[in-house]
Amino acid sequence: MAIFEQERTKKVLLDDTESLSCVIENWRNTNGHTEYIIRVQRGPFADKTWRIYKRYNDFVTLHSYLQTSGLPLSLPPKKIIGNMDPEFISERQQSLQKYLNTVLMNPILVSSLPAKSFVDPANYCQPFSELALQHVSLALRGEVGWEVVGPLTEIGWRLRKHFYQVRCKNTPKDELMASWTDYGPDKYLEDKDMQAVFKSFMQLQHPYIHSIELCLCTDIGGLVVRTSNKNGSLRDALCGAKPRLSFLKKYGNPKGHKPLSVSQVALYGRQILEALKFLQDKGLYYGHLHTGNIIIENDRVKLLDIENGVLGVPSFYRPYFIQHKRICNLEAIEVYCFGHTIYEMAFGAPLQESTMENLPSDCPANLRSVLESILSPEGCKNGLPSIDSLLHHPFFASIILTLHPNDKAHLKIPTSTKEQLKIAQTQLEERLREEQKMVRSQKRLVRVQEMMSSEEEKKKQKHKKVFLHYYPKHLHKWEHISKVLFSYLEARTKTIS
């Protein structure tokens, strides 16, 4: 029976948005070369750690790829003579630590496959592109008239989302783009319900949501085809980037930021809220709003990738909202993502923090009110506004939307599937709350350890002062005593943890 007890649906349990941190603990000489011993940790939990061993040349290889971003990364230079000197190696170790910190703290750099595979080779050394193409070919095998023209390499930030230019023989002149996405850790729908949702997506109509030409799902992931937009996403427009370039080159260090006017922010924000309200009323979770999932056509917003929620892939902003206890339900996630999107529209650059501390003095009062209600530390702590309340906010309520005669809002999901969607969304919220609890617990533990370290250090300095007052000639004895005290502190910390 064991063979039949396997998980019924295949999904990637690893959350690619979890933060990664590295500490270069030491170095060693191996076959005439220096290897750095690096401890890597995933997320805030000490049990998710492993060690990797890297030579300087491995850093050089990583650096040569990341330079595509145009970011000023400082890698210590090569040295031919004296590179085995212990003092030099220790200095280089410190410089390499700073380099790793810079890479891992940048959301664009750390999303790249070379950066991920450098620190986590066990999980990121698969042939992702080749596997995805196999899945796409299998998915299209039963669709008459559809074929893959070629891949669009690295235009998006997700490692498990791949883009292709495709062709349909029935409409050969249409420029079509397909995206393949593996199921993520928040995929809870059974196969039959997933197929029902994807079938409903084919009939979806809304003035502010991009239509879908073909929508297929397998036991591995989903394939969605849309008409291609030559101007790219809103993020491409804000960065002044060419849509078909790699995301590292587009977004790593844009040559300029082009914020929208206040009137455009209000108009597009209102349109986005209308689309979010529509999906909410239909019982569908989105959770993946950001400027990369928006295109603008004829002064109208078109949301992309509405399938991401049911596919279970982690949100772009998950590392941010997992830090906030009150952002623990689907509507709060939608609103939080909306706040980041509005911020980026208004200022041309993303807010690379979970909350904002200050806004420019010339920010209009109504826009300031919206952003503070969502992104301020107080807003995240006390609870975010609802989608309905934002629609009635003066900044958006003053906008009059113009609809065309052929504009329709239609999405019909079977009743039984809606019930399964509710169950799946409840499971998603439960996983989020559990992780938020663990994050808070870990933060409390760190604070306790810091307090203990601070108190012990004060005691240590006080004892040292007293000891040296009475025994000024016996400093070497104090060093032994301090080691004993440090061992005691370390033992107490381990007991608490």
Image (cartoon, rainbow, N blue to C red):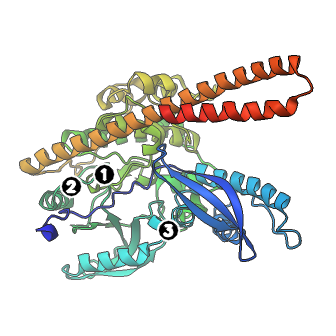
Q: Earlier in the sequence, mark 1 or mark 3?
A: 3
Where residue 366 appears, as percent x and y from the top left, is 48, 24
Along the viewing direction, whichever of 200 and 431 lies nearer the viewer: 431
Task: Identify the residue shown where x is 36% and y is 38%.
Answer: 333
In this rendering, does residue 67 appear at all?
Answer: yes
Where residue 132 appears, as percent x and y from the top left, is 36, 74
Kindly identify which numbered label has been placed on residue 154: 3
Q: Earlier in the sequence, mark 2 or mark 3?
A: 3
In this rendering, does residue 334 appear at all?
Answer: no
- Amino acid of disc 3: Glu
Neighbours of disc 3 within 10 Å: few (<14), some (14-19), many (20+)? many
Left or right: 345 as drawn, with respect to 488: left
Q: Is residue 275 above or below residue 75?
A: above
Tags 1 and 3 in contact by the CB under 8 Å rule? no
What residue does disc 1 label? 209
The local secondary structure at tag 3 comes to loop
Left or right: 425 as drawn, with respect to 14: left
- Amino acid of disc 1: Ile
- Amino acid of disc 2: Leu
Q: Earlier in the sequence, mark 1 or mark 2?
A: 2
Tags 1 and 2 in contact by the CB under 8 Å rule? yes
Along the viewing direction, whichever of 54 and 28 lies nearer the viewer: 28
What residue does disc 2 label? 204
